[in-house]
Image (cartoon, rainbow, N blue to C red):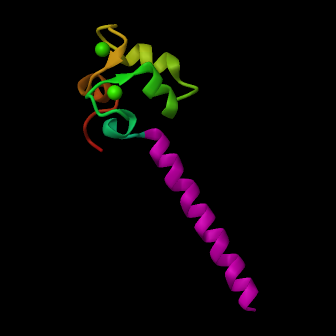
């Protein structure tokens, strides 16, 4: 019986961490993506978190200078979360 409980606990933990990971993918904090903390997100920094979404970088980079400022990063997402 104990083993059954343990198995159940493991499943619950797995499900919880999966849903957390999904949320983080949807909204990664600017400070997290800006790994060298210079206040700008370069393409290299961006692709560590959004590897499959480089088109999004170009869309978000409103003034096309190749880096994202904090405002540009949050523009499409909003400051809500
Ligand atoms: Ca940076
Ligand atoms: Ca820019």
Residue plotted at (37% across, 40% down)? 32
| Apparent side of residue 35 relative to residue 2 in the rendered image (left or right) | left
Report the magenta stretch's main SS: helix
Q: Quarter of the image holding residue 1?
A: bottom right
Q: Quadrant of the C terminus?
A: top left
Most extreme residue toward the bottom is 1
Residue 66 x, y percent position in the rendering: 37, 11
Residue 24 x, y percent position in the rendering: 46, 46
Residue plotted at (31% across, 12% down)? 62
Residue plotted at (37% across, 18% down)? 60
Which range of residues does the magenta coloring cover?
1-26
Q: Is residue 8 magenta?
A: yes
Residue plotted at (29% across, 30% down)? 74
Residue 50 x, y percent position in the rendering: 51, 30
Ligand 1, seen in the image, is in the quarter at top left
| Apparent side of residue 38 relative to residue 58 in the rendered image (left or right) | left
| Apparent side of residue 48 relative to residue 74 in the rendered image (left or right) | right
């Amino acid at each position: 019986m104990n083993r059954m409980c343990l198995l159940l606990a493991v499943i619950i933990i797995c499900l919880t961490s999966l849903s957390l990971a999904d949320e983080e993918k949807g909204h990664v904090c600017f400070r997290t993506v800006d790994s060298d903390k210079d206040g700008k997100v370069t393409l290299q920094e961006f692709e560590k978190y959004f590897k499959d979404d480089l088109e999004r970088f170009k869309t978000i980079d409103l003034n096309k200078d190749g880096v994202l400022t904090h405002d540009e990063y949050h523009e499409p997402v909003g400051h809500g979360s």
